[in-house]
Amino acid sequence: MTIHDLKAPLEKHFGFSEFREGQEMIIRDVLSGQDVLGILPTGTGKSLCYQLPAKLLGGTTIVVSPLISLMIDQVKQLKANGYKSVTALNSFMEHNEKRAVMKRLNEYSLVYISPEMLQNEWLQRALEGVDVQLFVIDEAHCISQWGHEFRTDYLKLYQTIETLGNPTVLALSATATKEVQQDIMDRLKLPFMNQRIYPMDKRNISLAVEEYSSPEEKVKRIIQVLEKNQAPTMIYFSSRQWAERVTCELREKLNHRVAFYHGGMEQTDRMLVQQQFMNNQLDIICCTSAFGMGVDKQNIRLVIHFHLPPQLESFIQEIGRAGRDGETSASLVLFTPKDHYLPQMLIQSELPDKSGLFKIMQYLESFVGTTLPGDETILEDMQFSESQWNFIKFQFEEADLIQGRLLKDIPSTFQQKLLRILEERWIYKQNKLTEMLRWIHHTKCRREELYKPFQGYIRPPYAPCCDVCDFRVNDLSFKEDQEKVHSVTWKDRLRVIFQQGGTYET
């Protein structure tokens, strides 16, 4: 297929006259039946890489998406733009609505599904009659970042691909080191994927890091910065309590519209906050890492980190949500000398320690040859986090020691194998945190140091570079045109009402 052949359907279906960097090559590969690993920077239109092929290939394209809010938002946008044969299967749907979609799966050209739902037997049976032409893993770094502990169903996607008859596979991400790229291919059992890797450094984002002696001083600094800047802003926290607390303080001290967002909120409340931010009804979001993935808001100008992310990949993903429109934006990281304790605690909550491993092995041995208790019972009995148990359970499943809920005989060598895997994960996560801390304390160009593990060269920025080079946070002066923000037509308002109240199927 020539570039001319692709440009015609691009304009017909999506209204674009040109492809962005990387899109056309990835689409070409997919249409020719090649499995592809595509790494494109945040905001460069990764979704088009499967949405256009879905139109051209016929049959059904399955998109594995990590967040319900993300898949619902993408479905809404596609429907609003005239792409009708799209749906999202998720736990947020009503039972009758889910059943209706299931009966008509083969009528949709795009189906968004979570990795967990793909493991349901009833869905697997429904997919047997569906002509799946393309299998997409959106935000594919989740395979490596979340799959080993938090969401182990990501590591089972290769089984789904085999069950579906090995359709063409497209894995997409905005950030992945060579190590993570290899892990993605290994976990999908597709070692020969065509790798389309493009520079991920955002040239329009200025970087700054500031040290303070206490969290209270960080709050004062945020207020000081936001008093001068009126523009869409995201503030990232590793603590739900701090996200709520800072929201309250900003509401008291600033003339800004502020809300918090985290995983402890009800799903409907999270959806409401996200829609308000997308529709320019909020200026500032105080959020945890649960917010932002796939959020297509073009005019975010400032991303502030109140707490340190546990790894550089997470940090690059989060700052990449600023300046999707290409305009100058900024990242500000605030830290205290004790801030490394919080990501350290998060690592500890994700993985069991050695004593916890020995304890659960003893516990499980008492169920050999019988039916295991439910996950909730095990979590309560062992006082484990969900991630800790998921890590253990997945290793048992991989070794074929759990069949349904029946626990088979445990080989004498299995505990040592499990201990070795656990130690490897501890070292891996500690090294990731060390990389983040090293970057925080780096005394030369922050841009070069940040992107060095991801690409061979760093492009010159067209915004001020970093606080080590030529960027000063106090010089920032983002002033959003508030009249423009609030001048919404009656058609826009009607569209929002119907999008929020409608269903997610045609």
Image (spheres, rainbow, N blue to C red):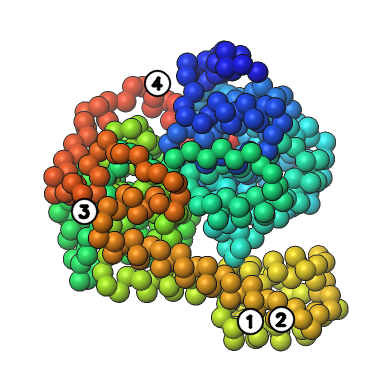
Q: Quadrant of the C terminus?
A: top right
Q: 165 or 194: which is nearer to us?
A: 194
Vertical comparison of 362 with 344: above or below: below
The Cα atoms of the two marked residues, 4 and 2, are separated by 62 Å
* Earlier residue among tags 3 and 4: 3
**Farthest front residue in view:** 456
**Residue that appears at 75% across and 78% down:** 414
Element under disc 2: helix
**Mark found first going from the N terminus, 1 or 2:** 1
Q: Report how far apart the C-alphas of labels 3 and 1 lie in the structure.
A: 45 Å
| Residue 397, horizontal then vertical, whole percent | 75, 66
- Looking at the rendered structure, the kind of residue marked 1 is Leu
Q: Upstream in the sequence, badge 3 or badge 2?
A: 2
Q: In x, y percent, where is residue 449?
A: 35, 54
Quarter the N terminus occupies:
top right
Secondary element type, mark 4: helix
Residue 145 visible in this rendered orientation of the protein: yes
Looking at the image, is 394 positioned above or below residue 49?
below
Upstream in sequence: badge 4 or badge 1: 1
Looking at the image, residue 407 sits to the left or right of residue 227; the answer is right
**Residue that numbered label 4 is attached to:** 491
What amino acid type should be assigned to the residue bearing mark 3? Answer: Val
